[in-house]
Amino acid sequence: MFEEAQYFAPVATRDDGSVIVQLAANHPGVADPVYRERRNAIAALALNHTAGDPIPEAAYTEREHGVWALVTRELAIKHREYAAAEYLIGWERLGLPAHRVPQLQEVGDLLEPLTGFRYLPAAGLVPLRDFYGVLADGLFHSTQYIRHHSVPFYTPEPDVIHEVIGHANALASDRFARLYRLAGDAARRVETQEALEFVSKVFWFTMEFGVLAENGKDRAYGAGILSSYGEIEEFRGMDILPLDLAVMGTTKYDITKYQDVLFRAESFSHLEDVVGTFWATCDDEIISRLVTDGAMAKSGV
């Protein structure tokens, strides 16, 4: 229900150096002064982080650990039924703690021996090219805050549950990690903003909201589905289209509701062949042709 690196609450630094996260008027935590101060303090950790240094620890509260434990327990049940096999392989390999929020440094320490990936703390908006580009280096920008306790199964923005349960479990898989790196290579290779946005949309409809066929059933592998308690129950009833680069890269989506259009790979190998090859080889000229193809497909030409 959100696009990675684009829909964080804005973060500002006051004249006195303090940090404020500007929550929207309808945010579940906007009227909770304790939560707002927590968000400000956690954002400051990321802003004050120096690349190469250990990631500062967020001192999570018992209530925050409780939200993590509740959501982790309920999602694990749904993953066994609806998640793609390759995601479950990553989940088994990574072994995230179930009863407490892991620190991002800890997540990176678990991931690096498996696939070489590490996490970087993000206070707020990360420029599109920076967010995707560092994937090529085995780095993943992540928030550290957790959703408001009043709605543990909902978040209007990507929180640590999405970033870690959704993405880190995938990044613990060698095959997924390779796809993430290829997406980063593509983001660095293309030159125009249009081409970069095309690359990001393909990422959205695969790594965030991708579906694939396994044993005659649709399984989710996208982090946006697998970290959403509600969406993981609903995705099979959405309009699921064949994997098509031109259509994915030119399809608009609404972040404020469940995704009503998804794209299905016929297998994980099919995903690698189509999307992996695209990210490995695309340039601005190739994407320009795909944009034209996508526009023609939508117009019925």
Image (tube, helix red, strand yellow):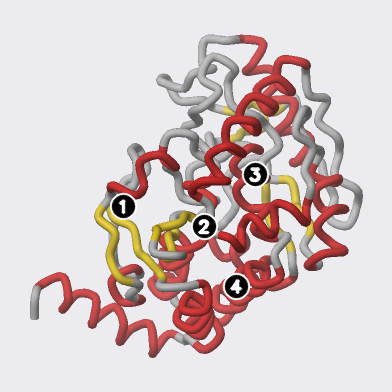
User: Is the residue marked by circle 1 packed among few (<14), some (14-19), or many (20+) residues within 10 Å?
Assistant: some
User: Circle 1 is placed at which residue position?
Assistant: 253
Dot 3 surroundings within 10 Å: few (below 14), some, or many (20 or more)?
many
User: Could you say where residue 38 lies in the image, as x and y percent from the top left?
Assistant: 70, 20
CA–CA distance between discs 4 and 3? 18 Å
Of circles 4 and 1, which is in front? 4
Instruction: Please tell me which of labels 2 and 3 falls first in the chain.
Output: 3
The disc at residue 221 is 2
Q: Which residue is depicted at the point 47% across and 73% down? A: 267
At label 1, which amino acid type do we have?
A: Tyr
Alpha carbon separation for disc pair 1 and 3: 23 Å
Is residue 67 shown to the viewer in this render?
Answer: yes
Find residue 162 and report its horizontal and vertical position in percent: 59, 42
Q: Is residue 139 above or below residue 55?
A: below
Identified at 36% across, 76% down, the residue is 245
Residue identifier under label 4: 179
Q: Quadrant of the N terminus?
A: top left
